[in-house]
Image: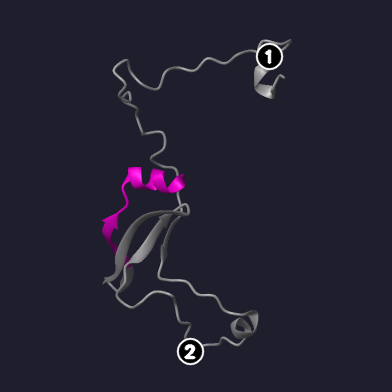
Amino acid sequence: MNTPFDTANKVGEQRMEFDALKEGNGEAADVSLDMILDVPVTLAMEVGRTRISIRNLLQLNQGSVVELDRAAGEPLDVFVNGTLVAHGEVVVINEKFGIRLTDVISPAERVRKLR
């Protein structure tokens, strides 16, 4: 039984050839990252989460307090495009909030979590 991937070399189709991404010794070739350095990504810091009913959501007003699932002093989660990349703590610098990274998730660990 043929699958859609078994149809190469039929009328009007061509098999694509790609350059090798690795050198002969198995290590990644030197690749310039200059092309992607200006690509914007979304960086988000998460203090905590909670679930509330729509009834309670509609009752929120100025001064309301929403309890989160995280204790005071616990590190914040830092996400890039929805992927956890680090943990950190809130800092104030020149009257603006910032985050000091306390633990950066290794690329290997991020890949492991994808599986």
Point 34% across, 29% down: residue: 32
Quadrant hosting residue 47: bottom left
Is residue 101 highlighted in magenta? Answer: yes
| 54 and 4: which is toward the camera | 4
Q: Position of residue 65 (x, y in %)?
A: 47, 86
SS for tag 2?
loop
Residue neighbourhood size for the residue with mark 1, other residues' Cα within 10 Å, grouped as few (<14), some (14–19), many (≥20)? few
**Residue 47 marker:** none
**Residue 13 marker:** 1
Q: Which residues are magenta?
A: 98-115
Quadrant hosting residue 88: bottom left
Q: Position of residue 60 (x, y in %)?
A: 57, 86
Identify whether 69 is placed above or below 101: below
Is residue 47 highlighted in magenta? Answer: no
Q: Nearer the viewer, mark 2 or mark 1?
A: 1
| 104 and 39: which is toward the camera | 104
**Three-letter amino acid code at disc 1?**
Glu
**Residue 37 falls left or right of residue 91:** right
